[in-house]
Image (cartoon, rainbow, N blue to C red):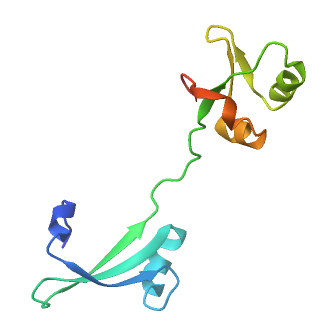
Amino acid sequence: MPFSSTSALDGLRVTRTLRAGQPGTQRLLLRHGGSLVCVRYRENEAGTERFTTIELIIDRRPTPKALVQLAVDWREKALQQKLRQAGAQWNASARCWQTELRIAKRLQLTNRILGPAQGRR
């Protein structure tokens, strides 16, 4: 019996949760492969019906890169060079450097973050 919304699950209680690969998930693992995350067994409030639900991965993609603006004085030429080598770009209109947050962390420049950059790369 297919459910049209998650509200149909409201009256059901989870009795067991199994991760993909555990005993009790083999049949569903064969059917859904690496997309299967877990299997949940549920019962209605009266305990007269048992339901099997699954959690699947349906999409996988890289997370968007968080861009930040950094304050770097115009006299800090060595730091500017490090930023260029790491792929940072000068934003002339904002008069600051823009780079990915992970790069700012790697270069230990989190104390210089002015805020999030406008847009994504």
The N terminus: image quadrant: bottom left
- Residue 98: x and y in percent read 67, 24
- In the picture shown, does residue 8 fall above or below 91? below
Between 10 and 110, which is closer to the camera in this rendering? 110
State the residue lying farthest toward the top. Answer: 93
Could you tell me if residue 86 is visible in this image? yes
- In the picture shown, does residue 74 fall above or below 51? above
State the residue lying farthest toward the right. Answer: 78
Could you tell me if residue 121 is visible in this image? no
Between 119 and 92, which is closer to the camera in this rendering? 92
**Which residue lies at the image location 49% right of the left edge and 79% below the top edge?**
20
**Which residue lies at the image location 62% right of the left edge and 7% below the top edge?**
93
- In the picture shown, does residue 31 fall above or below 83? below
Q: Would you identify the image quadrant in which residue 64 lies?
A: top right
- What number of labels is visible? 0
- Residue 101: x and y in percent read 65, 37
- Residue 46: x and y in percent read 9, 88
Residue 11 located left or right of residue 31: left
The C terminus: image quadrant: top right
Residue 18 located left or right of residue 11: right
State the residue lying farthest toward the left. Answer: 46
**Which residue lies at the image location 59% right of the left edge and 46% below the top edge?**
62
- Residue 41: x and y in percent read 30, 83
**Which residue lies at the image location 12% right of the left edge and 91% below the top edge?**
48
Q: Would you identify the image quadrant in which residue 52 lies?
A: bottom left
Residue 75 located left or right of residue 13: right
- In the picture shown, does residue 43 fall above or below 81? below
